[in-house]
Structures are given as structure tokens and as C-alpha cells.
């Protein structure tokens, strides 16, 4: 156990305790906060079970502590109070955001804990005792030279299901055999918790997950999305996806992947389509310096493109809970999803997958829409799947032209960098242990060239606007319309390729195009 670090949190908890006392209502800190507190992990989410109507109590507490009230679940009496610490002296940014989630006790505290999911989440402390113990620990810490992580202090933990023992043993164990009947989202949560904490799901709980795996299809897409994104955000996501498959959850969530199992590919591919897809996720994690890969090595990483710019781009948020890095992994899983239904054999007996990128993009978009991903997330993954072969196709004739790079960047938009990384991972996951050093260096040279040309165009070409739509309208007495946009696109492309560099050359190009079109 580690003491609570934030004095302002203790002050807020003390105020909450006093409010509960005036209402003659008991309060217990429960769930994930107790788990993380016992593990010494920082968390800003505090679950409090109260002996009265939680939404009513939470609304009153929000007024008293100047927090924001949010009704999370009216049917189950769950409400949240959001508080943001003020900036400390000398700091520009505000402090952390705290979430106090209030639920109504289901009977006494032991009965309430019996309704929770896993033993490590089914522990509680009486609120006032937690505050007293934490204050004592903070006082001792000020006097002690020991490191904070070494501090411990006694409390009367309410632990009817031996959750503390399971924490010690690094085990995820269901509280009862009915936990997944009550809420099927717990099926995914078990895997995600085990992955986050580096714990093991014990065998009986594994059997329960397999028994109820089909129930995950009944969970709302929003909840599945949240758990899936949290799982993919973790290192070794490919390993976690493989575990989902072992438990029967992956193909229930994404049944479109079932057809990929056993679909053989040309001899340039080491694995079938399904295994190749999982290996692509693993190769992505390897390339973005997140996890080791069984078939990767330091020489590969030294050759592969990487920079602060790429790292920053991958960390950019796309929607709440997602960024480019996590959606790149998801695209890696889905990039060949249409190969089973597009497979054919040519005259030589070689397998072909004509049109799998276009059909796969549509299928990937359908998967994300079903799981309630945002429009921007869906379009990004759809674009990644649709264009994942484009970089290789651009390198058919050594390095692509400046015009070809411009068109690539225009067509792929914010996904341009992601697609380059997906293409590299796709190659590695195709060849596996048979990857050629020369081929790999060739792929990396192509990718580095495209990135360098992208940087050049962004620095030298895109900031310079030779002409705009008004110039074309006035110079050639044209009416506004789609043709103006097409002419501007032509000018920008010629500028990027180095064919023109001045306003006069741009207008002359437009004039030639209009004359040719009038003939």
C-alpha cells in the first residue's frame, strides 16, 4: 500500500466524508482505486459506494466541492463528480482531473462487493478510515527518509473474496460464476486487466470466459470500442489479440476475420492470412519501438525510418481514447480482411487477391461503424486499408517522381505516414523469418525517400500559393465552380513536381489547359 500523494485529494475526500456524515450515510472506497492503491499505482478515478441514492448525494457533493455532476447510469444509480485541481504556485497548467464515481450500495458492503467482477476489484475501505490512515502515512513520510514506495500502513481492508491474495499472486479471478451473465463486457475487461497489470487469468475464469464468449456480441459497440482501444494501446497488443482469439472473443467481436484462418498465400508469404494479420500488428509494434518482435533485430530497426516527427504524429489524438498509433495497430489487424473472398488462382496456379484493398477498406469501415468508432477513426482506418499497397506500387520503378509523392500525400491525407509504416510492417509479416536484408533495405530506402520528399514539399511548396481561385476566375473570366478546384489542383501538382515555380508560369499552365479543353 502506498499513501495518497495528493493533499488536495485528501481534502476533497474529507469534505465528501463530512457531507455523508451530515446525511448519516456510510461511504466506502471500492473497486479499482483500492486495487491500484494497494499496488502503488497512481489513478485519478475513485469509486465510492454510499448507503443512499447515489445520484442525489453526488449532486449535493458536486455543489459543495465546486465539481461537475454527470449522471452516468440512471438505471443503476451511478453518478460522477468531476474535479480539476487548480494550478499550484509557479505552474501554468492546472492540476489533475479527478473522477469520483458514486454508486448506491446493494445491501451491505459485503453484498455489494459480491456483485463486482473480479476479486482484485472486490475490496473496500470505509472512507473515514482511509482518510485517517492516509493522513498518518503522509505525516510519517515527511519525517522519514525512506522512499515513498517503501511506505506501508495498517488498515482494516474489507476483502471477503481474498482479492489481496490474488493481487499478491498476480491473478485475475472472477468473484463468482455469474459475473459474465450480469455484464458480458467483463469478458473483455478480464483480458484487458490482465494485460495492463501483467497478471494471469486463472484457469476457472478462463473456462468461464470461453463458456460465455458469444455473449460479447450483445455488448454495446461503445463499450467494446473502449475496451478494445485500451487493449490495443498497451505494448504487446498482438499477443493480447492472440489471447482474445484463444478465448473465443476475437472472432465473436470481428467475425469477418474467421474466414482468414487457413487461407494460404503465395510463397512470398510465410503465414496464412490470419496469422499474417496478427504478425503485422506485432511488426508495427516493433517498428514504432513499442515491443520486441521475434523475427526482428537491431539492424532492421537501425535501417527503418524513425524520428521525433513520426513519434509525435503517432501520438496525436484522433478521437477520445484513440491516436494514430493505436489505430495503426487496428488497421494492421484488418488490412487483409477481404483476402479470403477475393482469392483466385491465375494460369500458373499462383494465388491472387485482386481488389482486396478496396473491398477490405469497405469491410474495415463496416467493422468500425458496428463498434461505434467515430467517423474520423473509421475514415482513417479505411484509408489505411485501401492504400496499404500504394507505397510498394510507387517503388516499382526505383524512387517515385515528385509528382507521384504529391499525389500520394494528397490522396492519403493524415494517413500518409501511417500507411508507410503499415507497408513496412506488411512486408516483414509477409516474409517473417525469411525476410531478405537487401529487400528490407530497399523498402526502407523507398520509405525514407517519400518522407524526405514530403518534408521538402511541406517546407518549400505547400506554404507558397502561386495563384488562387480568384486569380483564375478574374484572369479567364470563369464562373465559380468545380472546374476552378480542378485547375488549382493541377497547378499545385505541377508546382510540387518542379514544372512551374512562378505566378506567371501557373497562369500560363491554366491557359494551356483551358485551350486544350476548348478544342
Image: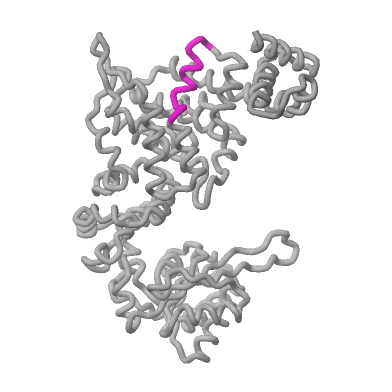
**Can residue 135 be seen from the camera position used here?**
no
Q: Horizontal and vertical percent for residue 80?
A: 50, 71
* Residue 368: quarter of image: top left
Q: Horizontal and vertical percent for residue 45?
A: 49, 66
* Residue 69: quarter of image: bottom right
Horizontal relation, residue 78 to residue 137: left or right: left
Q: Horizontal and vertical percent for residue 311?
A: 57, 38
393 is within the stretch colored magenta: yes
Q: Quadrant of the C terminus?
A: top right
* Residue 417: quarter of image: top right
Q: Which color mode does the image show?
A: one colour
Determine the residue positioned at 46% across, 25% down: 300
**Can residue 108 be seen from the camera position used here?**
yes
Determine the residue positioned at 72% across, 16% down: 510
Q: Quadrant of the N terminus?
A: bottom left
Determine the residue positioned at 52% across, 52% down: 320
Count of residue discs: 0
Along the viewing direction, whichever of 303 and 117 lies nearer the viewer: 117
Residue 156 sits above or below residue 210 on the image: below
Determine the residue positioned at 66% across, 26% down: 485
Residue 468 sits above or below residue 155 on the image: above
Q: Horizontal and vertical percent for residue 49?
A: 42, 78
108 is within the stretch colored magenta: no
Q: Which residues are magenta?
A: 386-398
Along the viewing direction, whichever of 145 and 105 lies nearer the viewer: 105
Horizontal relation, residue 388 to residue 178: left or right: right
Amino acid at each position: 500500500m502506498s499513501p495518497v500523494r495528493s493533499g488536495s485529494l485528501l481534502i476533497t475526500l474529507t469534505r465528501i466524508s463530512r457531507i455523508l456524515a451530515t446525511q448519516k450515510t456510510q461511504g466506502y472506497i471500492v473497486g479499482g482505486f483500492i486495487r491500484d492503491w494497494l499496488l502503488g499505482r497512481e489513478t485519478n478515478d475513485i469509486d465510492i459506494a454510499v448507503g443512499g441514492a447515489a445520484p442525489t448525494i453526488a449532486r449535493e457533493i458536486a455543489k459543495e466541492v465546486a465539481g461537475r455532476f454527470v449522471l452516468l447510469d440512471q438505471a443503476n444509480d451511478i453518478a460522477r463528480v468531476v474535479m480539476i485541481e487548480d494550478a499550484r504556485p509557479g505552474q501554468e497548467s492546472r492540476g489533475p482531473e479527478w473522477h469520483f464515481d458514486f454508486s448506491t450500495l446493494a445491501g451491505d458492503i459485503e453484498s455489494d462487493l459480491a456483485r463486482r467482477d473480479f476479486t482484485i476489484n472486490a475490496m473496500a475501505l470505509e472512507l473515514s478510515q482511509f482518510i485517517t490512515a492516509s493522513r498518518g502515512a503522509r505525516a510519517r513520510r515527511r519525517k522519514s527518509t525512506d522512499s515513498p514506495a517503501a511506505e506501508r500502513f495498517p488498515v482494516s481492508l474489507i476483502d471477503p473474496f481474498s482479492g489481496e491474495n490474488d493481487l499478491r499472486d498476480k491473478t485475475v479471478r472472477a468473484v463468482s460464476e455469474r459475473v459474465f451473465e450480469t455484464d458480458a463486457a467483463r469478458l473483455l475487461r478480464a483480458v484487458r486487466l490482465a494485460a495492463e497489470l501483467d497478471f494471469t487469468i486463472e484457469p476457472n475464469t478462463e473456462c468461464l470466459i470461453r463458456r460465455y464468449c458469444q455473449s460479447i456480441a450483445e455488448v454495446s459497440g461503445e463499450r467494446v470500442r473502449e475496451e478494445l482501444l485500451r487493449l490495443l494501446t498497451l505494448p504487446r497488443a498482438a499477443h493480447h489479440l492472440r489471447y482474445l482469439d484463444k478465448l473465443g472473443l476475437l472472432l465473436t467481436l470481428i467475425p469477418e476475420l474467421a474466414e482468414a484462418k487457413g487461407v494460404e498465400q503465395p510463397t512470398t508469404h510465410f503465414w496464412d492470412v490470419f496469422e499474417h494479420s496478427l504478425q503485422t500488428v506485432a511488426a508495427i509494434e516493433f517498428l514504432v519501438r513499442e515491443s520486441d518482435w521475434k523475427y526482428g533485430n537491431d539492424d532492421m530497426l537501425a535501417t527503418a525510418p524513425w524520428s521525433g516527427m513520426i513519434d509525435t504524429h503517432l501520438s496525436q489524438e484522433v478521437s477520445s481514447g484513440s491516436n494514430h498509433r493505436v489505430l495503426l495497430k487496428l488497421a494492421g489487424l484488418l488490412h487483409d480482411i477481404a483476402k479470403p473472398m477475393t482469392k483466385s488462382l491465375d494460369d500458373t496456379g499462383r494465388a491472387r487477391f485482386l481488389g482486396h484493398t478496396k473491398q477490405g477498406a469497405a469491410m474495415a469501415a463496416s467493422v468500425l461503424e458496428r463498434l461505434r468508432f467515430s467517423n474520423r477513426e473509421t475514415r482513417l482506418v479505411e484509408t489505411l486499408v485501401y492504400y496499404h499497397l500504394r507505397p510498394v506500387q510507387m517503388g516499382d520503378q526505383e524512387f517515385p517522381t515528385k509528382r507521384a509523392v504529391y499525389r500520394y500525400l494528397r490522396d492519403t491525407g493524415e494517413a500518409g505516414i501511417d500507411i508507410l509504416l503499415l507497408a513496412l510492417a506488411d512486408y516483414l509479416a509477409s516474409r517473417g523469418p525469411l525476410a531478405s536484408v537487401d529487400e528490407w533495405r530497399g523498402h526502407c530506402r523507398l520509405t525514407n525517400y517519400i518522407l524526405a520528399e514530403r518534408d521538402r514539399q511541406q517546407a518549400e511548396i505547400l506554404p507558397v500559393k502561386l495563384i488562387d481561385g480568384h486569380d483564375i476566375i478574374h484572369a479567364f473570366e470563369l464562373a465559380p465552380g468545380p472546374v476552378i478546384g480542378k485547375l488549382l489542383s493541377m497547378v499545385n501538382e505541377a508546382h510540387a513536381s518542379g514544372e512551374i515555380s512562378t505566378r506567371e508560369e501557373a497562369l500560363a499552365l491554366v491557359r494551356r489547359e483551358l485551350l486544350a479543353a476548348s478544342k
